[in-house]
Image (cartoon, rainbow, N blue to C red):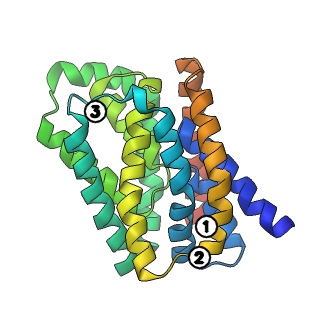
Amino acid sequence: MTMYMLPFTAGILAGGMNALAGGGSFVTLPALIGAGMPSVAANATSSVALYPGGVASAWVYRDGLRDVCGVPILPTLIVTIAGGLAGGLLLLWTPSGVFDGVLPWLLLVATLVLAFGRRLGAWLRRWVRASIGSVLAVQFVLGLYGGYFGGAVGLMMISVWTLLDGAEIKALNAPRTLMVSAANSVAILSFAIAGIVRWDAALLVGSGAIAGGYGGAWLGRRLDPMVVRAATLLLSTAITVAFFVRFYW
């Protein structure tokens, strides 16, 4: 019973985290690796398992969809899907060792942007106007990252969007859940075709993630924006520290 409850519970926690701020894979990925699964297969299986929970969250948030940094949803979605496909193929074709070393620094940048994004964004927007092309280029990179690894991609999207747009984190939850799910859609298709997904584990984790994703999105719509911001900063800091420890120690 314990071997079934652990991945199911990890799925519930991860689904809730993804709905509120992102970073759910940092619960499921260690659990799957700890169960003896190779890291690449664990990463692919985690992405597949969390996908239904992300879709459930996107459905709850559907009436809050808005443009991203002044760019309409449709072109942003198309670019994100293209990036997700490229990232999924990259995971299948290349080792993840080099990216493991870069990842902690990317997360550190994301955390700093979250912490100081309002002040920096207000100053930056007085001197710089983000063009449609630059926003879409950044979104392609975020989609690629989401398809390749995906850890905290929701946090990174919110960090960049907050810097460019200045919107409240809570207002960005709807497009965030949609874009993360879009990037994952094409990535997990490539994982499934390549045959590296452990479907038994994915079913257990995914079942929990559906419940956690729906419940987390319901809670996220009712929380005060400051609470969401504080929780997001706390989570991003913990994730950043964990990845530095993981790689360097």
Q: Name the residue under label 2.
A: 198
- Residue type for callout 2: Arg
Q: Mark 1 points at which residue?
A: 202
Q: Which residue is drawn at 71% across and 71% down?
A: 34
Q: Is residue 84 above or below residue 235?
A: below
Query: Which quadrant would the N terminus be assigned to in this image?
Result: bottom right
Neighbor class of circle 1 (other Cα within 10 Å; few <14, some 14-19, many 20+) is: many
Q: Distance between the residues labelled 1 and 2?
A: 6 Å
Q: Mark 3 points at which residue?
A: 68
SS at mark 1 in the image: helix
Considering only order in the chain, which callout, 3 or 1, is on the residue closer to the N terminus? 3
Q: In which quarter of the image is residue 98?
A: bottom left
Left/right placement of residue 41 relative to residue 127 reads right
- Residue type for callout 3: Val
Residue 129 image point, x, y percent = 15, 27
Considering only order in the chain, which callout, 2 or 3, is on the residue closer to the N terminus? 3
Q: In this view, does 145 lie above or below 225?
A: below
Query: Which quadrant would the C terminus be assigned to in this image?
Result: bottom right
Q: Which of 117 and 44 is in front in this view?
A: 44
